[in-house]
Amino acid sequence: MLFEPHGDIRFSTDGRLHLVEVRGPWNAELIDAYRRSSTATVHDFAAAGPWAAIIVTRGSTMFTDDAEAELRAMLTDPGRTLNRVAACYVIGPEVEGYRLCDGILRNVYEPTSPFEIFDSLPPARAWCERLIAAARNAGVTGAL
């Protein structure tokens, strides 16, 4: 590791939602620390059927170029994206860089699943739950 992780990141699950809370700005070392600490949980969660990721950003949505590269690399792991039917960020107007990273985040996430950015958690949760229900109705079961 070249630098200490900047920012703070935590994750939990709620039903079929993988909830991530990140306080930025953040760097590649923070993304790497998250990847290492969450890989087993995400792989098990993903193998169980359709799911969605909600990333709630606090403080700042700014990140370094190497953090973007680390995020892209993490999202190339098929075990992390297996059965993921949606990913979204919650970035409220109080967050530094609000909407500044919109295009970058879309470019990173849209190749892996439907992606949106919301101002608050309730519409993000509703959107994800709608896509999870549609995937279940379409027969996505979690089989590897």
Image: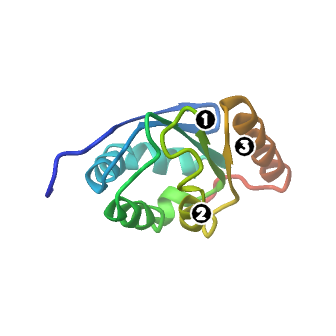
| Circle nearer the N terminus (3, 1) | 1
Label 2 – label 1 distance at C-alpha: 16 Å
Residue placed under numbered mark 3 in the picture: 128
Q: Position of residue 58 (x, y in %)?
A: 47, 33
Neighbours of disc 1 within 10 Å: few (<14), some (14-19), many (20+): many
Does 134 appear above or below 144? above
Residue 112: x percent and y percent? Answer: 60, 65
Image quadrant assignment for residue 111? bottom right
Most foreground residue, 3 or 61: 61
Q: For the image shown, how many numbered marks are present on the structure?
A: 3
Kind of residue at badge 2: Gly
Label 1 belongs to which residue? 92
Label 1, secondary structure: give it.
Answer: loop
Secondary structure of the residue carrying numbered label 2: helix
Q: Nearer the viewer, mark 3 or mark 2?
A: 2
Of residues 98 and 5, the one nearer the viewer is 98
Q: Residue at x 59, y 50 (%)?
A: 99
**Residue name at image x 72 percent, y 29 percent:** 122
Per the rendering, the mark at residue 103 is 2
Q: Are marks 3 and 1 in contact (CB under 8 Å)?
A: no
Task: Identify the residue at horizontal 77%, vertical 42% (top origin).
Answer: 127
Please name the amino acid that badge 3 sits on: Cys
